[in-house]
Amino acid sequence: MKKQLKWLTLLLCLMFLMTGCDVEGNLGITSESSQTTVQSSPSDISVSSDEKNIQLDSIPEYSGKPYVVINDNQPFFTDADLTEEPFENYSDLDELGRCGVAYANICIDLMPTEERGSISQVKPTGWHSVRYDNVDGKSLYNRCHLIGWQLAGENANEKNLITGTRYMNVDGMLPFENMIADYVKETDYHVLYRVTPIFEGDNLVASGVEMEAMSVEDNGDGILFNVYCYNVQPDITIDYATGDSYLSTDSTSNNTSASNETTYILNENTMKFHTQDCPSAKQMNPENRKKYTGNRQDLLDQGYEACQKCHP
């Protein structure tokens, strides 16, 4: 009898090990992807940048438009990915410090409920504080969120910020982010959203980003797209290996002189900035008042807002 019990015990142990159960009895799933899961879900396994279905050499050359449609505008999600569970995944930085895939199920639960904070402390790979007169807002580069702040409230997350041109950030990515945000707010539905920065070789600056999105509850009737946004800036030549840049019409000029800096008055309480002669600045409580000389975009990156009266 004891011998039979011994063999039965060994058999049960063997069966337990073969199921891959963890110590709490849950079925374990092993994934080789290096993802940081902010909120887990049944579909929290995303595709790494090395496994993406697009290749850089398959993307048309930039021809004056900020983005191009990929795969007939069909994202590479599967039926198994469709879920109404909120989640966010951000890839670990690679050996060069570069971001990877960012993947989330956008919904009201993920959207920010607090004021946006500063992101100036994050220096993505290839980052340069460089300014050109022919760039909107002067600054060539923005700290571009892969998953936009308005969608998931991820602010100074280094795994979610890349060096992106003003053109890609505003003309390429922002319209699609606004589309998702408006849809979610109007319907209270979910949108699967995956953004993949595409780096060529060991370049520190991404050549662009792939953006995939699909609304869940209506199976893509509301939101469905797959696009590649070019990380370019018209009339500026970028060295993607380092992030260096110069005017395309004059390779000897980078237009980065300190003369482009401006002096502003900051209100550290309201997080607004003003011109020096703004009436609001003159009436400001001295305890909240701070003088700042620098770039306008840097203030915006730090979470400050421009005064609506003096429009600095």
Image (cartoon, rainbow, N blue to C red):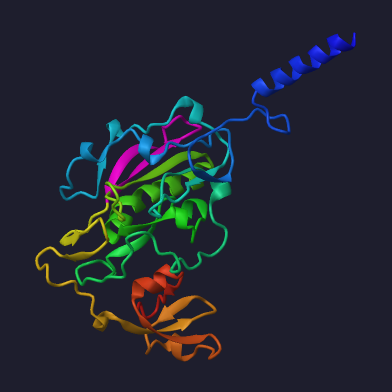
Measured as percent of width and height from the top left, residue 288 is found at 53, 85
Magenta span: 208-230
Measured as percent of width and height from the top left, residue 193 is found at 44, 41
Residue that lies at the very extreme toward the front in this rendered image: 3
Is 65 positioned to the left or the right of 177 in the image? left
Q: Which one is in front, 126 or 44?
A: 126
The relative height of residue 224 versus residue 174 in the rendered view (above or below) is above
Measured as percent of width and height from the top left, residue 88 is found at 53, 45
Q: Residue sitting at 25 percent across and 56 percent down?
A: 241
- The dominant secondary structure in magenta is strand
Residue that lies at the very extreme toward the left in this rendered image: 249
The relative height of residue 177 versus residue 124 in the rendered view (above or below) is above
Q: Quadrant of the N terminus?
A: top right
On whether residue 219 falls in the magenta region, the answer is yes
State which quadrant residue 280 falls in: bottom left
Q: Residue sitting at 59 percent across and 41 percent down?
A: 40
